[in-house]
Image (tube, rainbow, N blue to C red):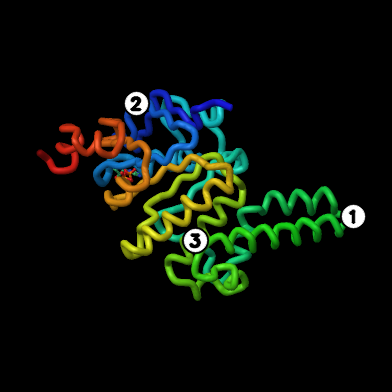
């Protein structure tokens, strides 16, 4: 297995006259927890959207798990092992916790349905298996989340909503997990608790590589192995949090020093 999970070469994204990503060469090593940081408007979300197939690049290439995925669509990337969460919770609130997570396994269950259209037992067996898998997954989180498996998502507090989104992402056993501002809408303590839970259960899911976009620098410092700093769509620095925090270009970008 290749040590590089994801690499971009000359990745450029233009929105009209604006260069949101400018000739980005980024390499993400397997098993790392990476912080993707930079001031507002520096291109972090565009980078996530582009590597996960939501935004088409203007030029350059993306390689994920050794294959060129520059033009691969979002659903295909998900089934190849790239999962993400969004800054704004994307749960379907009238649905149950179970349904919200099972949506992530839609392809698995539907393909069973079509292949076994005359063998309903196989479809039901897959559903039973999925139910057990989701229950086991929820049980790995704190605060009795497994007991809320059939609760409506809208009855959950923000930390539980985030946990459900993480469960949905982990269900496909991704090799790369993108977390977009996990702290959004949560207190400092909740954010730290959630991150600790993710890191604790990560080994049970094959230690997916994690990339976090986050403004909460204390969290980035505590949990990341490596940081990449963007400014105006360009990579201006990378290294450990300590190294990038001391870098003059990073200080200028953040503080206008
Ligand atoms: P960050 O996530 O670091 O705050 P973004 O990736 O959201 O930065 O934005 C990078 C730049 O691209 C910003 O100048 C932003 O206004 C612009 N941008 C992002 N998405 C679009 C879009 N869909 N259309 C036009 N401009 C966009």
Label number found at residue 118? 1
The mark that comes first in sequence, 1 or 3, is 1
List x then y, in percent, for residue 211.
42, 42
Q: Is residue 246 left or right of residue 130?
A: left
Local crowd at mark 2 within 10 Å, few (<14), some, or many (≥20)? some
Label number found at residue 163? 3
Give the label, 1 or 3, closer to the camera: 3
What residue is rendered at 29% in x and 52% in y? 216
Residue where numbered disc 2 is placed: 23
Label number found at residue 133? none
Task: Judge whether residue 44 can be spotted in this image.
Answer: yes
Task: Judge whether residue 16 can be spotted in this image.
Answer: no
Local crowd at mark 3 within 10 Å, few (<14), some, or many (≥20)? many
Q: Nearer the viewer, residue 7 or 31?
A: 31
The mark that comes first in sequence, 3 or 2, is 2
Which image quadrant is residue 133 in? bottom right
Task: Say which element carries label 3.
Answer: helix
List x then y, in percent, for residue 57.
43, 32
List x then y, in percent, for residue 68.
54, 26
Task: Say which element carries label 1.
Answer: loop
């Amino acid at each position: 297995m290749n040590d590089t999970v994801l690499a971009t070469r000359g990745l450029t994204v233009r929105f009209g006259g604006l260069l949101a990503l400018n000739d980005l060469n980024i390499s993400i090593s397997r098993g790392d927890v990476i912080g993707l940081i930079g001031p507002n408007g520096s291109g972090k979300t565009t980078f996530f959207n582009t590597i996960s197939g939501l935004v088409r690049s203007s030029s350059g290439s993306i390689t994920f798990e050794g294959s060129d995925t520059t033009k691969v669509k979002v659903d295909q990337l998900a089934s190849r092992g790239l999962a993400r969460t969004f800054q704004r919770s994307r749960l379907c609130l009238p649905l149950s916790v179970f349904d919200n997570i099972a949506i992530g396994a839609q392809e698995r269950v539907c393909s069973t349905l079509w292949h076994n259209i005359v063998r309903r037992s196989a479809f039901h067996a897959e559903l039973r298996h999925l139910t057990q898998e989701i229950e086991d997954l929820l049980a790995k989180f704190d605060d009795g989340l497994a007991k809320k498996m059939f609760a409506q998502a809208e009855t959950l507090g923000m930390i539980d909503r985030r946990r459900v989104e993480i469960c949905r992402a982990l269900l496909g056993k991704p090799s790369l997990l993108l977390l977009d501002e996990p702290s959004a809408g949560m207190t400092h303590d909740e954010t730290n608790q959630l991150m600790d839970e993710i890191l604790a259960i990560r080994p049970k899911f094959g230690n997916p590589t994690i990339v976090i976009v986050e403004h909460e620098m204390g969290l980035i410092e505590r949990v990341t192995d490596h940081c990449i700093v963007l400014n105006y769509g360009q990579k201006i620095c990378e290294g450990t949090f300590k190294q990038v925090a001391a870098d003059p270009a990073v200080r200028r970008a953040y503080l206008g020093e």
